[in-house]
Structures are given as structure tokens and as C-alpha cells.
Image (tube, rainbow, N blue to C red):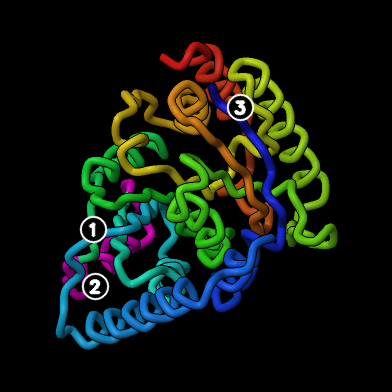
């Protein structure tokens, strides 16, 4: 049976340095042995991170695989890569997939130094978001698989807040919702006037349609922050090649996942830019995917 609920804001969207403290705040008091164990684990992670950073020790066990679909995002690629490396756990691999970009994205990617925890893939022609994610999934090894868009409209630090509940075995799937608020006061930095409002309306309608067909109670279907239990997402027979992938994944995890959770995520984009202009064809593709996969098939 699939359940959907919204966790407390403070628990899952604290700053990375405060996240462990927030997650350990429970009704019961931890005993001294448990506190010492956690301190030892933290020191071990720090030592491992220092060894990996110096090149003395490669990552042997992958905890998190971060998929980064890229299409004409040359301007933001260095920032998103640096940010992922800054906030993610040491045992993280990054799967970068260039989907037929024509702005020099591939030339930058192929010049990056080789690393055992970084995979760079390329499609010669633009196939679509769904095809890019499906291609990247075949190369993931992590216990957790996360999706991070390359345009930095979403901060990878918020993605960490969505990853943590799965690492803590409290959820199978976590969506970062742009509709939720941190502490009741968080505001997404969206610009674009009428275009912004129209995008919100379309996304709300598509999310409502998805909820009716899946029985979930999501607030943001097309968020760019989605995190999954690795074995779960890799087991799904995904077929969509374009923007319909979000609807297909949601319909299929609704049938397979025990717990689906939402956490707030920050979204910073200028919706007047051409890459954010939602057209009728994109909306209809998503709606078609909702209908086609409504039974989780």
C-alpha cells in the first residue's frame, strides 16, 4: 500500500551542517554509546572524504548516484558540478549526460579530468529528458539515485535534504516540492510575471491529474528534484523519451514504493527565458503519459 505524507520542515531541510543534529532530535534521549558510535562514524566519513579528495583512496562503495541531464547548459555546468561535490556525501558518483547540446556543453564535459566516481555520456542528437534519464540509469551504482537538473534552478543542497530520508530508510521515494514552504515563510525566487503564473497553473493541473490516477497526494509532479531507492528505480520498465518521463515514473513508483515523501525545495529561475517556456505540446505529452501509465504499466 502506498502512502504519501509531508515531513516536518525542520527535520529534512536543515542546512547540511545541521542536518545530522536535526535528524537525531527525537522524543527519546540517545544513550552515550549511541552518541559515541555516531561520532566515530562521522570521523570516519571525514577521514574517507580527505583520502578521496587527495586521490589516495578511490570510492569503493557508492551510496548516492546523481544523474545530471544536460541540454544547452554550458554556462551552469561548472557551478552545478562544484556544488554537487561540495554538498554530497563522499561516496557519491555523478552521471553527466549531454543530450545533443549545441552550445559547447559537450566540449566542456569532455575536457573534465577522469575520475572513478564520474561518468560522462553523450547523445549526438537531442532525444529528450526521458531518454537522457533512462540512459543514465543504466550506469548508476548507488543505493540511492537522485536527479539534479544542470541549469542550477535547483540547488543541490536541497537535493541532499531529499536524499537523507532514503539513506535513513524512512522512504523509498522523495520528491522536492516547489510548492511547499520552509517554516511557512520560504519563497521561491521566480520571475516572469504572467509566464510564471501560467506555469504554476499548468503544473498544478497536471499534478492534480496525476494524483487522481495514482491515488497519491503530491504537490509538485514535475519537480527537477526526484530521489529514489536505487534498486527500485532501476527495476522500473521506463519507456518515455521526452517530458512524459516524470508522469511515467510517478505512476510506476506509486505501484511499487511503500513510502513516497515530499520535502520543500528551493527553485530559482527566470521563467521568461526560452528554456522555461512551457508550450501546449509539452503539457499534452505529460497528460498523454499520465493516461498511458495510469495503471502503473
What residue sits 59% from the left and 64% below the top? 23
Residue tagged by mark 1? 120
Which of pointers 3 and 1 lies earlier in the amino acid sequence? 1
What residue sits 39% from the left and 37% below the top? 128
Instruction: Say few, some or many: other residues with alpha carbon within 10 Å of mark 1 (under 14 / 14 to 19 / 20 or more).
Output: some
In screen coordinates, is 65 left or right of 114? Answer: right
What residue sits 35% from the left and 35% below the top? 232
Q: Quadrant of residue 117?
A: bottom left
Residue tagged by mark 3? 283
Identify which residue, 15 or 287, lies in the foreground: 15
Q: Quadrant of residue 14?
A: bottom right
Q: Quadrant of residue 84?
A: bottom left
- Residue 101 in sight in this render: yes
Q: Spatial distance from mark 3 to mark 2, Cα to Cα?
A: 36 Å
Q: Residue 119: image x %, image y %?
A: 22, 59
Q: Is residue 297 magenta?
A: no
Q: Residue 40: image x %, image y %?
A: 37, 80
Instruction: Say few, some or many: other residues with alpha carbon within 10 Å of mark 3 (under 14 / 14 to 19 / 20 or more).
Output: some
Q: Which range is magenta? A: 99-116
> Does 4 appear above or below 166?
above
Which of pointers 2 and 1 lies earlier in the amino acid sequence? 2
Question: Which quadrant is the C terminus positioned in?
Answer: top left
Amino acid at each position: 500500500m502506498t502512502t504519501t505524507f509531508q515531513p516536518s520542515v525542520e527535520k529534512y531541510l536543515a542546512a547540511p551542517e545541521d542536518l545530522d543534529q536535526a535528524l537525531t532530535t527525537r522524543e527519546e534521549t540517545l544513550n552515550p554509546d549511541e552518541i559515541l558510535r555516531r561520532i566515530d562514524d562521522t570521523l570516519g566519513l571525514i577521514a574517507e572524504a580527505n583520502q578521496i579528495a587527495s586521490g589516495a583512496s578511490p570510492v569503493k562503495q557508492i551510496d548516492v548516484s546523481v544523474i545530471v541531464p544536460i541540454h544547452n547548459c554550458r554556462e551552469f555546468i561548472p557551478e552545478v558540478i562544484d556544488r554537487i561535490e561540495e554538498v554530497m556525501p563522499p561516496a557519491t558518483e555523478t552521471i553527466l549526460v549531454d543530450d545533443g547540446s549545441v552550445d559547447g556543453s559537450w566540449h566542456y564535459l569532455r575536457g573534465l579530468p577522469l575520475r572513478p566516481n564520474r561518468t560522462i555520456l553523450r547523445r549526438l542528437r537531442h532525444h529528450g529528458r526521458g531518454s537522457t534519464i533512462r540512459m543514465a540509469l543504466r550506469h548508476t551504482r548507488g543505493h540511492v539515485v537522485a536527479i539534479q537538473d544542470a541549469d542550477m534552478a535547483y540547488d543541490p543542497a536541497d537535493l541532499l535534504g531529499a536524499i537523507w530520508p532514503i539513506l535513513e530508510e524512512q522512504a523509498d521515494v522523495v520528491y522536492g516540492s516547489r510548492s511547499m514552504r520552509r517554516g511557512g515563510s520560504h519563497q521561491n525566487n521566480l520571475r516572469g510575471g504572467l509566464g510564471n503564473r501560467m506555469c504554476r497553473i499548468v503544473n498544478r493541473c497536471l499534478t492534480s491529474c496525476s494524483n487522481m490516477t495514482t491515488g497519491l497526494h503530491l504537490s509538485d509532479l514535475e519537480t527537477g528534484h526526484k530521489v529514489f531507492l536505487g534498486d527500485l528505480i532501476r527495476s522500473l520498465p521506463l519507456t518515455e523519451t521526452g517530458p512524459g518521463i516524470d508522469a511515467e515514473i510517478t505512476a510506476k513508483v506509486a505501484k511499487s514504493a511503500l513510502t513516497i515523501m515530499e520535502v520543500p525545495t528551493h527553485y530559482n529561475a527566470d521563467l521568461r527565458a526560452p528554456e522555461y517556456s512551457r508550450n501546449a505540446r509539452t503539457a499534452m505529452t505529460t497528460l498523454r503519459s499520465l493516461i498511458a501509465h495510469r495503471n502503473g504499466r
